[in-house]
Amino acid sequence: MFTGIIEEIGTVESIQMAGNSGRLRLRAPLVCADLHEGDSVSVNGVCLTAVELRGASFDADASPETLRRSSLRSLQPGGLVNLERALLPTSRLGGHIVQGHVDATGEVVAAQPLGDGNWWLSVRYPAELDRYLVSKGSVAVDGISLTIASIEDSVFAWPLFRTPGATRICAPAVRATWSTSKPTSSPSMWKSSSRARPHRPRFRSSVCLTWDTELNDGPAL
């Protein structure tokens, strides 16, 4: 179980596919500091199991169902991912309860600048999930605990405030908006590109969605 408060931005070192499943190798010095084989880690909101530790990196397997349900299928070596270790009974519940079982993938359709490095992001979700999402309800996007600020016509939106090195929306549509080069975990990823069109992303990508069952009367996470 997780809270949607990102601990570290990890890097995809390699991806090995075997049929319809795959093994990810992720570099994450902070997460690996006390990680053990068999521990659960939220990777972009998806609960994965650490199956092998390699110093500051760990391996995790993604089943065909996981790849079908989530945006992990679009990851590439060198890509960045949001990571969170499993919640302890004594931990603060700073976000909302996130079990890491992805309900659907959404599509980033707009990123509008609010000034001072802040953005207003909009995500389109499958229409059949309408009854599970409400204004001021909780939703996890790529593992980040968020509160829906507005919702209309199967699109919800929220303000993303600048927190360099802490969280990121792992979607190329958003990365293209505020970075001219290949994204890194440094604050430079927040620099706005002169070629970017914040109101109209140059291309779209999927993000993982989960929502708060208790608040929104949705299905099990």
Image (cartoon, grey):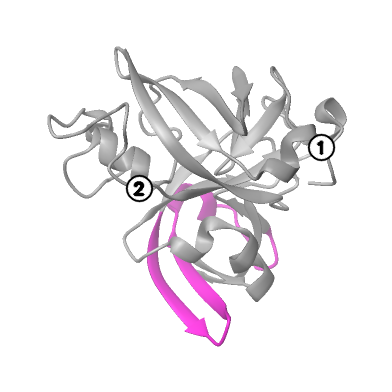
Residue 121 on the magenta span: no
- Label 1 SS: loop
Total numbered badges shown on the rendered structure: 2
Amino acid type, callout 1? Pro
Relative to residue 217, is residue 73 depicted above or below? below
Q: Between residues 107 and 57, which one lies in front from this camera angle?
A: 107
Where is residue 48? Give x, y as percent: 64, 61
The quadrant holding residue 125 is top right
Q: Which residue is mark 1?
A: 89
**CA–CA distance in space, label 2 to label 1:** 35 Å
Residue 25 on the magenta span: yes
**Magenta-highlighted residues:** 11-39
Q: Residue at x 54, y 77 (%)?
A: 22
Relative to residue 61, is residue 201 depicted above or below? above
Extreme residue toward the left, this view:
194
Left or right of residue 159, residue 14 in this image: left
Residue 204 visible? The answer is yes
Relative to residue 30, is residue 11 depicted above or below? below
Where is residue 26? Give x, y as percent: 45, 62
Left or right of residue 78, residue 110 in this image: right
Residue 87 visible? The answer is no
Q: Which residue is mark 2?
A: 172
Extreme residue toward the bottom, this view:
19
Where is residue 162? Give x, y as percent: 38, 21
- Label 2 SS: helix
Q: Between residues 213 and 143, which one lies in front from this camera angle?
A: 213
